[in-house]
Amino acid sequence: MSWLHMLVPSASQLAQMPAQLLIGLINGSFYAMLSLGLAVIFGLLNIVNFSHGAQYMMGAFVAYTLLNVLGVGYWPSLLLVPILVGIVGMLIERIFLRWIYRLDPLYGLLLTFGLTLIIEGLFRQGFNSSGVPYGMPPEFRGGINLGFIFLPYYRAWVIVASIIVCLGVWFLIERTRLGAYLRAATENPALVQAFGINVPRLITLTYGFGVALAAFAGVMAAPMQNVSPLMGSNIIIVVFAVVVIGGMGSILGSIVSGFLLGLVEGLTKVFYPEAASTAIFAIMAIVLLLKPAGLFGKAR
Amino acid sequence: MKIKALMATAVGIGLAVAFAPNGVFAQSNDGPVKIGVLSDMSGLYADLGGPGSVEAAKMAIEDIGGKVLGKPVEIVTGDHQNKPDVGANITRQWFDVDKVDAITDVPNSGVALAVNEVGREKNKIMLFSGPAASDLTGEKCSPTTAHWTYDTYALANGTGAAVVKSGGNTWFFLTADYAFGAALERDTTNVVKANGGTVVGSVRTPLNAPDFSSFLLQAQASKAKIIGLANAGGDTINSIKQASEFGITSSGQKLAGLLVFITDVNSIGLQTAQGLQLTEAFYWDQTDETRAFSKKFLERVKHQPSMVQAGVYSAVRHYLKAVEAVGSKDSAKVMAKMRETPINDFMTKNGKLREDGRVVRDMYLFEVKAPKDSKAPWDYYKQIQTIPGEQAFRPMDQGGCPLVKKG
């Protein structure tokens, strides 16, 4: 009987719609930020970065460590953590990933999956599995009553920050000279190198940048979620579905589908909560059947 | 093509994870008593059970001298990964190939219910400390199963009753969408109704959801005075953290954490968790005996024991003593001896193993301290009430266990 809820919304469900859509948008912000990094890495390096969730988790834990060991607060962490974790990413690229660019992308997927298991294991060893607390920064305590929802200031900030980051990255890659180099370097590395551009360095920086985006999302998540070694695994599969729906490697596609799927998930949580974690995969299956390259992807 | 191949591989990896080697290391030789610690070794329940439970079992073996029936007691460990099929497979292998005599811990009610059936079929002893579902001693009870530490009925009876009595008479549940959540919601609903309260609604939430705000808003819209959290581990932590963020707790609605472990309180932090009432069978800082055990445990595991880990110690010790007393590993004889002997250890005073498999013990209602009242690491709880065992647990004739003779 419960599936009937999907067809006939009750009055209280309708009354909750605006609030739930807003919540969906907030969750969509995270999907967008995370799938963006994946799209940058896949689009420019052809690596399916399975360790993206682990790098997101690292972002949250580095912010926790900075706060509790060095007393570095939330704001400096927003800048510092992506840099630190980005450097770790660049080391990973130099040590492991650069050997496999000529191979099938499957190797990259397997390699980064293995790295995920190792990274998660190390954090579990260091911090235990149930997680550590990261308090809400004092300036974000409280919220604003919009009539249909009490919106915590922090969640409002999440949406704003996510939109700024997404648009910034899109602009950087699609509209600037640096972005043009990057795209050219992936199309034809030899030619771009001939123009005097250091392509391997460009690629290292790109991977580091994609990882930094994951770490940024991790810092953003820390005050509102349990900071635990498993937090990446809990979200990464959904993010992969988002990337596939948007079109592998499409920057715009990952942003749009990130927000869109957040909204869809938000609605599912009202009308048929049991299906909330599956709805996105049903959509993925439909999109793959109708448009195998994804909504914004180009067929390769 | 590439994308399809990638998707195929992604699915393949998923399957590989599901069936990955589960860390079972066992030796197969006849004779010695062999105990299997089946737990969640790396997932969301690993801190409250997991490697700490293994250590607790080892401590119990050491404390009875390391030997039973003249031979050193052996221990094997397995990771059920919170998957009932994985747990049942390990259990079968342990019983059929590795000659394991008894299995302990098993946090996650879904896994425990599956494993319980294997134990029934093979006539082997189950010493459950980790799982919560009271069905294990209700309709699903088994002659060789002991449910040691706590259950959903006792949790509901402790926290649920206390909350209703202090005026929280309308409830909305956030329920983890599996066997445990359903059992906890059912048992708490009964307690709420029995005390004159009403339940206005509930929502089933997927396990390990990172965001509960959507469900919390539904709870808020219900106007219930109490939001009952029928979930555990990371789900409870995220619910409490986000309820505080969304101003739900400051706008008059109250949270009732129905299953909160000390490891969860540690993760939430006292700032957010203060004032929360919860029911446990054990807290490290209760008596000299609990402190002595916890000190030894802390040295080995680096955090204070949860009630689940303390319960593993208690169960393994009682079991080994019964084996020694009857001079045999025969499941029926050992169970009879365990039922006949009162349970007395650092966490149990005159506990009793009933016919339906329930261990009746005192439970305690605690309140989480405010940060200013916490004087030392892990100084988290203030004890409010002792709930005598006979009151805490479901009377044997109400559980529907077929083993219990009517009359």
Image (tube, coloured by chain):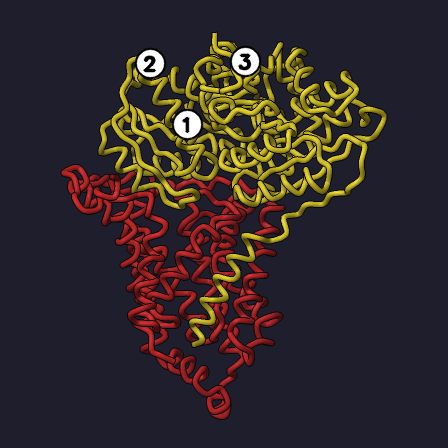
Residue depicted at 52% across the width and 41% down the height:
B84
Q: Name the residue under label 3.
A: B362
The Cα atoms of the two marked residues, 1 and 3, are separated by: 19 Å
Q: Name the residue under label 1.
A: B184
Left or right, residue B129 beside residue B240 = right
Tag 1: residue type?
A: Leu
User: Which of the two labelled residues, at mark 1 and mark 2, occupies the earlier sequence position?
Assistant: 1
- For residue B295, which quarter of the picture? top right
Tag 2: residue type?
A: Ala
Q: Mark 2 points at which residue?
A: B194
- For residue B16, which quarter of the picture? bottom right
Up the image or down, B317 lies above or below B238; here it is above
Is disc 2 surrounded by few (<14), some (14 to 19) or many (20+) residues within 10 Å? few
Left or right, residue A32 beside residue A145 = right
Up the image or down, B345 lies above or below A58; here it is above
Up the image or down, A89 lies above or below B221; here it is below
Is disc 1 surrounded by few (<14), some (14 to 19) or many (20+) residues within 10 Å? many
Tag 3: residue type?
A: Asp
Between residue A75 and residue B139, name the one nearer to us: B139
User: Residue B280, how many percent across, how many down?
Assistant: 51, 22
